[in-house]
Amino acid sequence: SQQGEEDPQALSIQEGENATMNCSYKTSINNLQWYRQNSGRGLVHLILIRSNEREKHSGRLRVTLDTSKKSSSLLITASRAADTASYFCVVTGGTSYGKLTFGQGTILTVHP
Amino acid sequence: NAGVTQTPKFRVLKTGQSMTLLCAQDMNHEYMYWYRQDPGMGLRLIHYSVGEGTTAKGEVPDGYNVSRLKKQNFLLGLESAAPSQTSVYFCASSYSRGRALNYGYTFGSGTRLTVV
């Protein structure tokens, strides 16, 4: 099954700063998705970018996708303390449908 | 629209006891999944289902069984609980292959299980 690997493992910033986290994967994909998990809670779907898209925006979120480098980045602008969470990227495609697998995630801490 | 509902939210079991976790979704999703999450780790896929009456093994299926008798429900069973099964369990659902190109997965809020 396919899996995205997030980098860095942990990120600590001040409120108001931008946060950037990256995702790398190894095979061809249909889409790439980012999820947020607040401590002890379920995952929340943030944004999905298809393999034929290069950039997508949703509120303070900006996702880019470079299929030639097999990588994606998630930018959160003007971070808030409430953005403190773990962020995961997942990829789907090929024979991996039905087997969504996760990496370790990036732990983002936004200090007030 | 409730999304994905997991019951129970918390449970403490003694070693050797059995239990069933229930996942229910009201979005008419074809695919459903069970994951476990241990401290400091990402989610690991236990079992999944691509349709009513069908199930398949994920990364860590040992010690668990599942059933999908109705499209909206996906049950996870522990026949003889072990301390190693102490974890937080998450259920998720999604559309099937075609529609999944444009939609993400919906997760439940989790079941925190402790086996003593």
Image: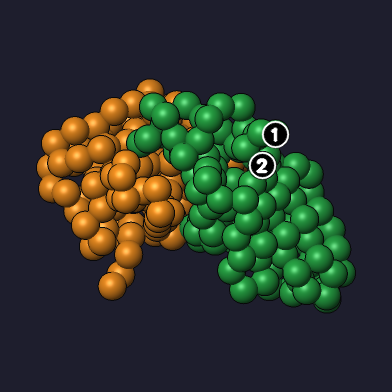
Indicate whether A1 appears above or below A104. above
Indicate whether B26 appears above or below B33. below
Residue drawn 32% across the image and 50% down it: B99
Which hue belongs to chain B?
orange
Quadrant, the N terminus of chain B: bottom left
Q: Is residue B79 visible?
A: no
Instruction: Residue A75: name its quadrant.
Output: bottom right
- How far apart in space, not on screen, are marks 2 and 1 (Cα)? 6 Å
From the viewer's perspective, tell me whether residue A94 is left or right of residue A54.
left
Residue drawn 56% across the image and 33% down it: A3
- SS class of the residue under badge 2? strand
Indicate whether B72 appears above or below A92. below
Q: How is the image coloured?
A: by chain
The amino acid type found where label 1 is placed reads Lys
- SS class of the residue under badge 1? loop
* Residues beneath discs 2 and 1 located on the same chain: yes
Indicate whether B30 appears above or below A93. below
As drawn, the chain in green is A
The amino acid type found where label 2 is placed reads Asp
Residue B102 image point, x, y percent: 40, 54
On residue A54, the disc is: none
On residue A69, the disc is: 1
Discs 2, 1 touching: Cβ within 8 Å: yes
Residue A112 image point, x, y percent: 83, 76
- What's the chain of the residue with tag 1? A
Residue B58 image point, x, y percent: 39, 28
Residue B26 image point, x, y percent: 23, 62
Which residue is under mark 2? Answer: A66
Residue drawn 81% across the image and 53% down it: A11
Q: Is residue A14 visible?
A: yes
